[in-house]
Amino acid sequence: MNPDQTNTKAVGPFPVFAGEDLTAARSRLCVLTHDTNVPEIKLPTADTDDAIFQVQEGVADTALDSAERFAPHREFRVPLKGACVPGGRLVLADAGTAADKGKLRAVPAAAGTYTVRAIAREVGVDTQHVLVEAVSPFTVTVAG
């Protein structure tokens, strides 16, 4: 046993406070941040945010929630914006739309650079909790 690795957890959810109202955000991707050095989770506000965790409970602001690392080589179900096909690359939905924060969507056709977070494992339709394979985030550029 490595004595330096006390108080660690290899995989699974961990307790953390909600930094905003997450009551409607269960299973969405979120960002680990802090309030006066106290860890908390919030929904992403931009595609470039480090949304590498998933909200597990969905609770009111300042309540104790739990989050799980949206880790590569693992399957998750995440709310979908729009539609997707198996093997489709998925990125964060438009964080400018409050109802879509933390959801995933297929890579848009609009020109831009997007961060791929997962690969769809099944056909998905709008609002479905689609089965995805989490990946190490990487960028793709759609030419205009």
Image (cartoon, rainbow, N blue to C red):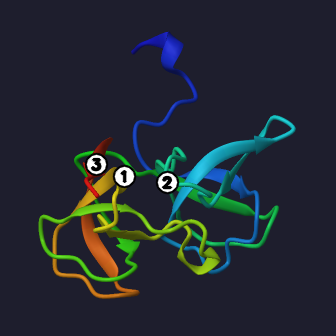
- First of labels 3, 1 by sequence position: 1
Q: Assign the C terminus to one quadrant of the image.
A: bottom left
Residue matched to label 3:
141
Q: Assign the N terminus to one quadrant of the image.
A: top left
Inter-mark Cα distance, 3 to 1: 6 Å
The kind of residue tagged 1 is Tyr
Query: Does the CB distance between marks 2 and 1 fall below 8 Å?
Result: yes
- First of labels 2, 3 by sequence position: 2
- First of labels 2, 1 by sequence position: 2
Residue matched to label 1:
114
143 w.r.t. 103: above or below: above
Residue 33 x/y as whole percent: 69, 43
Q: Secondary structure at mark 2?
A: loop
Query: Does the CB distance between marks 3 and 1 fall below 8 Å?
Result: yes
The kind of residue tagged 3 is Thr
Residue 117 x/y as whole percent: 34, 53
Residue 47 is labelled as 2
Determine the image quadrant of residue 43. Answer: bottom right
Please tell me how crowded label 1 is: few (under 14), some (14-19), or many (20+) other residues with Cα within 10 Å: some
Please name which of the two marks, 2 or 3, marks the residue nearer to the observer: 3
Q: Is residue 142 visible?
A: yes
Determine the image quadrant of residue 45. Answer: bottom right
